[in-house]
């Protein structure tokens, strides 16, 4: 049964310009407590970061050309009650070294996720996927239902080709013709094609502008992403872009791609989190929630696509109620 809730958001606990000494100390403590490791998989080595105590949750980042860094430090707030297991997916972030354009596919991402589960000795795992990561979570759960105890789909990307069409239409309407033309101009530029970090962040400043309810949260994400792109450098950006292209060929660009009819086979409890200011249409999120028999849909008020950042306390309450 689907239960739709509208929850009021609260002020962000952290700000970019001024962080109190106690908050800075807590942030440093969380960073120092993290355990980093490498996971050997076929043809690659995955970077993993484990932090917190309590019920383990494996976290799948979105993009799919991003890595886990955009979650930090916001999602780490869950570590007071949960053990978070992040990893950079193959060909992205700190898992890009030695990975060629032909080494990434939907099949390799699914196999890698299963290796992550085995590496951390999880017979059955709670899986949290954000944006594109929710699509990967669903693809994995359909193939390995016994390995997933619970699903958290946070601001999920569309799960069918027809819903991708709905998303693109809504996106164009929110963005506007002038901004879309400017974005296309940047994408066509030599700098962007070469992976220049400044050109890439300029593109994403346009892309994510309609994804937020509040300007300060938008600016905070842009600051974090800018640092990540600079850290990646041109080679890392191009490797991640190649991975994204490969995954699009295996999913959204497949004629008639549609996970929705198959989601009825999933029996695990599922929490679907949406934001009422997300640039992904509420209709496409509802299609996923309605397709999974044991799904609960929670829609957060005054919240956009990055709900763990924009509405952190409400996200925590929803996850606590679901997992505990």
Image (tube, rainbow, N blue to C red):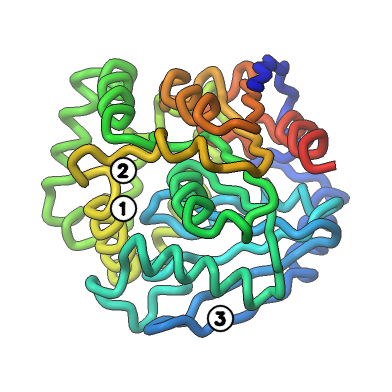
- Looking at marks 3 and 2 on the same chain, the residue that comes earlier in the sequence is marked by 3
Above-or-below relation of 170 to 291: above
The reply to whether callout 3 and callout 2 are in contact (CB within 8 Å) is no
Above-or-below relation of 288 to 247: above
* Of marks 3 and 2, the one in the foreground: 3
Estimate the x, y position of residue 69 in percent, counting from the top left.
Answer: 55, 58
Looking at the image, the residue that sits furthest to the front is: 265
Q: For residue 256, what is the image quadrant?
A: top left
- Rounded to the nearest whole Å, what is the CA distance between mark 2 and mark 1? 6 Å
Estimate the x, y position of residue 195 in percent, counting from the top left.
Answer: 25, 61
Above-or-below relation of 188 to 155: below
User: Which residue occupies 47% across, 73% down?
Assistant: 94
The answer to whether any part of residue 215 appears in the image is no
Pick whichever, 315 or 221, lies toward us. Answer: 315
User: Which residue occupies 71% across, 41% down?
Assistant: 18
The reply to whether callout 2 and callout 1 are in contact (CB within 8 Å) is yes
Residue 39 tag number: 3
* Of marks 3 and 1, the one in the foreground: 3
| Quadrant into which the N terminus falls | top right
- Rounded to the nearest whole Å, what is the CA distance between mark 3 and mark 2? 33 Å
Residue behind mark 2? 202
Residue 198 tag number: 1
């Amino acid at each position: 049964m689907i239960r739709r809730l509208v929850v009021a958001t609260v002020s962000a606990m952290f700000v970019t310009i001024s962080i109190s000494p106690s908050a800075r100390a807590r942030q440093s403590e969380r960073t120092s407590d993290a355990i980093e490791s490498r996971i050997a998989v076929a043809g690659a080595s995955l970077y993993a970061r484990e932090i917190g105590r309590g019920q383990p949750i494996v976290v799948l980042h979105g993009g799919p050309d991003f890595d886990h860094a955009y979650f930090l430090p916001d999602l780490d707030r869950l570590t007071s009650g949960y053990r978070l297991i992040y990893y950079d997916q193959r060909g992205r972030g700190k898992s890009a070294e030695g990975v060629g354009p032909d080494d990434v596919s939907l099949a390799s991402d699914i196999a890698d996720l299963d290796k992550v589960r085995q590496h951390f000795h999880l017979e059955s795992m709670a899986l949290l996927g954000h944006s594109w990561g929710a699509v990967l979570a669903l693809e994995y759960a359909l193939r390995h239902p016994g390995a997933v105890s619970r699903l958290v789909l946070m601001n999920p990307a569309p799960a069918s080709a027809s819903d991708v069409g709905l998303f693109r239409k809504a996106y164009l309407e929110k963005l506007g013709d002038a901004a879309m033309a400017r974005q296309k101009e940047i994408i066509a530029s030599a700098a962007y094609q070469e992976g220049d970090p400044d050109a890439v962040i300029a593109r994403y400043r346009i892309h994510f502008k309609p994804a937020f309810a509040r300007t300060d949260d938008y600016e905070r994400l842009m600051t974090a992403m800018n640092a990540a792109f600079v850290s990646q450098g041109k080679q890392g950006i191009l490797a991640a872009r190649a991975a994204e292209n490969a995954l699009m060929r295996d999913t959204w660009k497949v004629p008639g791609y549609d996970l929705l009819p198959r989601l009825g086979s999933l029996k695990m409890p599922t929490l679907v989190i949406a934001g009422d200011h997300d640039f992904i249409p509420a209709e496409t999120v509802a299609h996923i929630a309605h397709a999974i028999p044991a799904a609960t849909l929670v829609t957060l008020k005054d919240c956009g696509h990055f709900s763990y950042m924009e509405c952190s306390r409400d996200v925590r309450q929803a996850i606590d109620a679901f997992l505990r």
